[in-house]
Amino acid sequence: MSKKGVEFVCQNCGSTYPKWQGKCDSCGEWNTIVEEKSGGEGYSSISPKKKGRMIEFVPLTGEEKALTRIDTGIKELNRVTGGGLVPGSVILVGGDPGIGKSTLLLQVTAKIASSNTQDECYYISGEEAIDQVRIRAKRLHLETSPVKLASATEVKDIIATLEKSNASVVVIDSIQTMYLDEVESTPGSVAQVRACAYELIKLAKKKGFVLFLVGHVTKQGAIAGPRVLEHMVDTVLYFEGERGHHFRILRAVKNRFGATDEIGVFEMQDQGLVEVENPSALFLAERQGNVSGSCVFAGIEGSRPVLVEIQALVSQTSYASPKRAVVGWDSNRLAMVLAVLETRCGMNLSSQDIYLNIAGGLKITEPAADLAVAMAVISSLTNKALPSDTVIFGEIGLSGEIRAVSQASARLKEAEKLGFKSAIAPSNLINKEKVQKNRNIAVHEIGNVQRLINWFS
Ligand code: TYD
Ligand code: MG
């Protein structure tokens, strides 16, 4: 029997259940379901007393307002937002605690506030005391910027204040610390997070300011994750990075005003986040030439080509079932590539442990990396190094064929720019002529994986 007035809500994705269970069926997370009071957001039916007003329909064409965007002064952020911040839009910035969300947003507000005095920028921290934010501002050398700083958590106070303001940009750091009296659950619960975000978003649309909501990604179910807000906002940016690495990647996963999958690359330094204009050079900086098991993948992240090193280590297993460990790539995809190498090329990998690493902490999702992964594995297995001035890209099909991938031209151009002399690519390159013309890079076109092995040995 489910209790009255109570529901069980997954703090990761917001799905509700009539009774508690260990695993959320919707997002697959464990221990994220907690009890919350229900009825905060729901209503039973439309009141029969109040009649609805007629709405007006218009044709698809008509006068449209030109989209004016606020330049953030940070090129990498302009890139991920699709060319700057759109007034009245709401941007959710998600990421692990300590990854640099507060640092980035303080830098952004400070830059906008100091470059244009008409733009009033508000930074409202619910997490840190004023002194803490001031110390950070000093460290970032931004203390003279006319940002309006406050430490507050009550959404009603924030709304009353912003109503009277002339705000252009408002940062709420973080949405999980905000609360509304009317909602009975604790701050950070799905109901609170949604209700607070709803009120703030309504105000942002009404007043036309850019609203940044910071949301921590949480592994435990104690507080609601940013995913429960994704559908309410215009843009969702995730800040990613490995703890041990200095670089941070800002990735757009949803954007009503620009392309998704666009990335911005930053480096966390002593004085805050610094933009990285040439990510390929950074990702390849620590590469050592002429080692087996390493190859350079010419990838595309959003609209930009990025070269990364893929490393594989194949070693004789001492376990009953061989180990497969992957960092930065999809382990199912690796299993598929290995199966193709075993079945179509007769390679014996069942007695080998295989470790795969995308150097530098970048996460790759493109299937175009298949060929580079296969190459790294073959190179490590045969203990033979690939020429260090070669890049590689292509998707592998289950019958071992190598499929064309998009933007081959851009990939080759980037490789050429970084001094690579040859490339291994699918044989049916899109726009063949365009790819081969005026290139100083030799392209070895390869039709299937078997040929790749022949070419390499
Ligand atoms: P922060 O912005 O507080 O993370 P979040 O808001 O996502 O929780 O970043 C905190 C980390 O960044 C902290 O570990 C220290 C580091 N850091 C630097 O390395 N350099 C800097 O200039 C600043 C301000 C922070
Ligand atoms: Mg923070």
Image (spheres, rainbow, N blue to C red):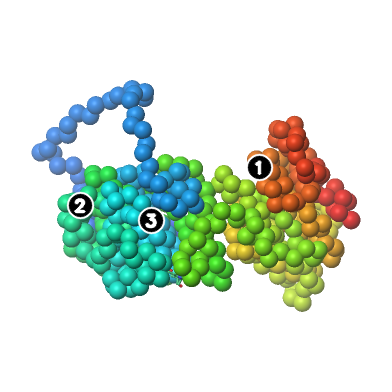
Which disc number belongs to residue 165?
A: 2
Q: Is residue 431 left or right of residue 85?
A: right
Q: Quadrant of the N terminus?
A: bottom left
Under 8 Å from ligand 1: the CB of mark 3?
A: no
Instruction: Decide if ligand 1 comes within 8 Å of the CB at mark 1.
Output: no
Left or right, 282 with respect to 438, comes to: left
The residue indicated by pointer 3 is: 111
Q: Residue at x 74, y 75 (%)?
A: 319
Q: Which residue is mark 1?
A: 410
Which of discs 3 and 2 lies nearer the camera? The answer is 3
Q: Residues within 10 Å of mark 1 (few under 14, many from 20)?
A: some
Give the class, few, some or many, for how many residues have Cα within 10 Å of label 2's Cα (few <14, many ≥20): few
User: Which residue is found at the position 83% from the left and 50% from the top?
Assistant: 452
Q: Judge: label 2 CB < 8 Å from ligand 2.
A: no
Give x and y (percent) for residue 176: 32, 64
Relative to 384, say whether 409 is above or below.
above
Query: Which residue lies at the image location 70% right of the left edge and 67% below the top edge?
Result: 355
Mark found first going from the N terminus, 2 or 1:
2
